[in-house]
Amino acid sequence: MSFEQKIDGLIARHKEIGEAISKPDTLKGGEFARLSKEYSDLGIIVETALAWKTALAELAEAKQLINGKDADMRELALEEKAQLDVLVPKLTEELQVLLLPKDEADAKNAILEVRAGTGGDEAALFAAELFRMYQRFAELQGWRFEVLEVSEGTLGGYKDAQASISGKNVFQKLKFESGVHRVQRVPATETQGRIHTSAATVAVLPEAEDVDIQINENDLRIDVFRSSGPGGQSVNTTDSAVRIVHIPTGVTVQCQDEKSQHKNKAKALKILRARLYDAEYQKREAERSASRKGQVGSGDRSERIRTYNFPQGRVTDHRINLTQYNLDQVMEGSGLAAFCDALIAEDQAAKLAEVKD
């Protein structure tokens, strides 16, 4: 099937679905919801496809006029052809990107996990700053950011922290944030003004629904205990903290931020479900990309992906060699979009190259 035939088939399918959902009484069960989603998903493709077909027709017409006898029309046609010679390849590439196989997890919400790495108290302080950076970024995107669990360090930083981020295409936008983030700066505790290098690890997991991951209660060991804060001081006097161990995989999740044991258990199960789903997702992605010639990073969570250099106000993403001198804006969330968008574009370019090869 040629590219044009594929486009015509999608336009026809879009029209067919439109006619079907215009008569909802004839549809059974969940057909209306399923077809409505397909109609919406096809909408942007069809809109671009129709613009592409119009541009192709106008280009063919302009070429005919150039070869005609009317000198004035030839001049106008030459100008129009110059514009269309730019527009047609642009629309063609947009269509090719839209037709790339979709990552099933892109539309999902996400579980964000940030952990302090090498660097002691300074790493914990940086982990807390990263966590707040993503919180601000989520607010700017109009997403909901719910803190699930925070384990504080001794100087106010975070040993580790988890959050649930919900909204439109959260995982698609944040999935390339997973990896080691390195900071270079003079710590507040440094008396001689030396620059130290510390690190924090970020993991962005697609949030799983019950239908994505079935968890057998018999596979879980659930322990309850008394919550405690930094230094071991008691937070409350009831056994409200929950630790869940998934016995087949050994994955362990602990939540103690809520005073309610029930709420802590619900949060822990949400994180556990996301980690189990992510393990399957990573396995599939590794198999799918094994033959790909170019990738945005390796997907390895231990890979160093970005450096934040405070003395120079510089942020560098090592996977795409992108450097920006707007560290303050990045840490405030507003400057992070440029990195997310560039990583998505690079991934799409790699997939396009793979299809064309």
Image (cartoon, rainbow, N blue to C red):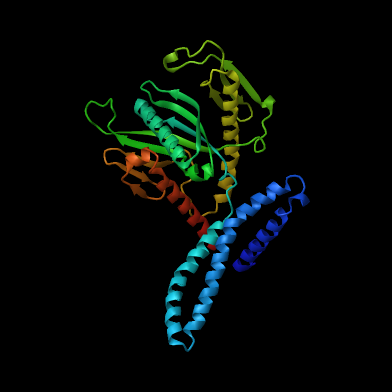
Q: Quadrant of residue 125?
A: top left
Left or right: residue 128 versus residue 284 is: left
Query: Is residue 174 placed above or below 163 in the rendered structure?
Result: below
Of the 4 image quadrants, the one containing the N terminus is bottom right
Could you tell me which residue is drawn at 40 percent across and 39 percent down? 333
Residue 30: percent from left, percent from top: 73, 45
Query: Among all residues in the image, which is located at the extreme left?
Result: 192
Q: How many marks?
A: 0
Q: Residue at x 45, y 14 (%)?
A: 232
Give the vertical position of 106 relative to 251 (above or below).
below
Q: Residue 119: image x %, image y %?
A: 36, 29
Q: Nearer the viewer, residue 83 or 262?
A: 83
Q: Position of residue 215 (x, y in %)?
A: 66, 31
**Camera-side residue: 231 or 26?**
26
Q: Quadrant of residue 117?
A: top left
* Residue 345 in sight in this render: yes
298 vs 245, left or right, is left
At horizontal 47% and vertical 71% (from top left) the residue drawn is 84
Looking at the image, the residue that sits furthest to the top is: 237
Query: Quick one: which residue is furthest to the bottom in this view?
Result: 69
Residue 99 visible in the displayed image: no
Residue 314: x %, y % from top left: 31, 43
Image point (69%, 56%), residue name: 17
Left or right of residue 139, residue 261 in this image: right
